[in-house]
Image: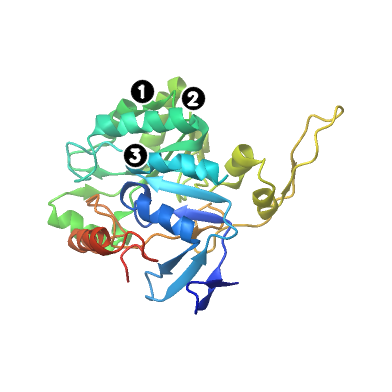
């Protein structure tokens, strides 16, 4: 479709039903004001990180936002606005414990992040917030036993505030800039092999006897079903139907039909699922199709394992540029 971006100019734009905000940067933490401004404006301009081309994305048909964040606290004040506009949403909240190792240099203290998680869960409901301990990383200082203790320390505090835990094993060797950043920080990382993966999976299963989470891996090939661990879909049509079956437009997009309730049939959901696999993601990714509106090189969390920043210096430069010039611009960094 074409959208008007001024009184004199219209442009071609995509009209996604599901918005991802964002795998590429932490919009809730750093760009929540910008995001709400763009929602009100009705569109964003998105820059393809691989070829540099820019495209317009309209919110005209958007029915769901999936937020990804390590610190969603700044967006809390806008949730009432989203609710007032009947905009559906849920959160992928990454909450790791790499404090001693300083792998996430500029995120809030661990206890504050746990408090934020609990506050969000109480505000929107635990079914709309998913805990990610992601990625799992091994180093010369973090072995599988210590990693499991870190997971346990957080899980013991969160098990009443979410239904799900998602994790992935760090694939450091396939990201050369991640390798480079870890080497610069003198972090001696260790790649996961199958034996270590199974050790962690077995440990999580034991921990989960108390927690009762649904546990899933993100974009992993290894089959861990014997440990009650599924292959997860982070943008998940099954979860969406469970949470938002009242939204007919969203259900139509997914290919679900919700019949009128009657006295003789308690089965209210008839599934006629479409093939909605997101072909723009990695082959092992189970997510259904969405449009991510984030931008690479804009997240100043300082995570040394980050694949979305060329360098921390560039990310901070773009963030500062945003703060100074671009809180209402069509793109995050004003390009």
Can you see residue 172?
yes
Q: Is residue 300 left or right of residue 29?
A: left
Is there a contact, CB below 8 Å, between mark 3 and mark 2? no
Q: Is residue 283 left or right of residue 100?
A: right
Q: Mark 1 = which residue?
A: 156
Number of numbered labels in the structure image: 3
Q: Which is nearer the eye, 2 or 140?
A: 2
Residue 250: give x, y in percent of width and height.
Answer: 64, 50
Residue 251: give x, y in percent of width and height.
Answer: 68, 48
Residue 322: give x, y in percent of width and height.
Answer: 27, 61
Residue 212 has which mark?
2
Q: Which is nearer the eye, 315 or 207?
A: 315
Crowd band around label 1 with a 10 angstrom C-alpha radius: few (<14), some (14–19), many (20+): few
How far apart are the two marked residues, 1 and 3, measured between alpha carbons? 21 Å
| Foreground tag (3 vs 2) | 3
Q: Mark 3 = which residue?
A: 73
Name the image colouring: rainbow
Q: In the rendered view, tell whether residue 49 sits above or below residue 290.
A: below
Q: Which is nearer the eye, 161 or 6?
A: 6
How far apart are the two marked residues, 3 and 2, measured between alpha carbons? 26 Å
Q: Residue at x 50, y 55 (%)?
A: 19
């Amino acid at each position: 479709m074409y959208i008007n971006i001024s009184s004199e100019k219209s442009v071609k734009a995509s009209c996604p039903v599901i918005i991802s905000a964002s795998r590429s940067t932490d919009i809730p933490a750093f760009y929540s004001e910008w995001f709400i401004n763009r929602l009100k404006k009705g569109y964003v301009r998105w820059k393809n990180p691989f070829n540099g081309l820019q495209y317009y994305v309209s919110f005209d048909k958007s029915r769901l936002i999936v937020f990804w964040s390590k610190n969603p606290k700044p967006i809390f004040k806008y949730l009432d606005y989203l609710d007032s506009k009947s905009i559906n949403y849920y959160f992928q909240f990454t909450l790791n414990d790499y404090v001693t190792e300083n792998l996430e240099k500029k995120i809030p203290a661990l206890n504050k992040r746990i408090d934020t998680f609990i506050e969000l869960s109480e505000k929107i409901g635990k079914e709309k917030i998913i805990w990610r301990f992601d990625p799992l990383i091994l180093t010369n200082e973090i072995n599988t036993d210590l990693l499991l203790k870190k997971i346990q320390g957080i899980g013991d505090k969160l098990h009443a505030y979410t239904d799900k835990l998602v994790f992935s094993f760090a694939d450091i060797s396939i990201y050369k800039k991640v390798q480079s950043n870890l080497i610069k920080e003198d972090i001696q990382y260790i790649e996961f092999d199958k034996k270590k993966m199974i050790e962690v999976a077995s440990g999580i299963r034991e921990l989960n006897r108390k927690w009762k989470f649904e546990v899933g891996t993100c974009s992993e090939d290894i089959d861990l079903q014997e440990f009650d661990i599924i292959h997860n879909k982070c943008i998940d049509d099954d979860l969406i139907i469970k949470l938002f079956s009242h939204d007919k437009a969203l259900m139509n997009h997914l290919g679900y039909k919700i019949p009128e309730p009657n006295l003789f049939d308690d089965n209210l959901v008839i599934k006629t699922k479409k093939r909605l696999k997101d072909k723009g993601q990695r082959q092992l990714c189970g997510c259904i199709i969405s449009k991510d509106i984030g931008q690479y090189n804009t997240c100043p969390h300082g995570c040394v394992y980050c694949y979305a920043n060329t360098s921390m210096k560039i990310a901070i430069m773009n963030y500062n540029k945003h703060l100074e010039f671009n809180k209402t611009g069509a793109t995050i960094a004003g390009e």
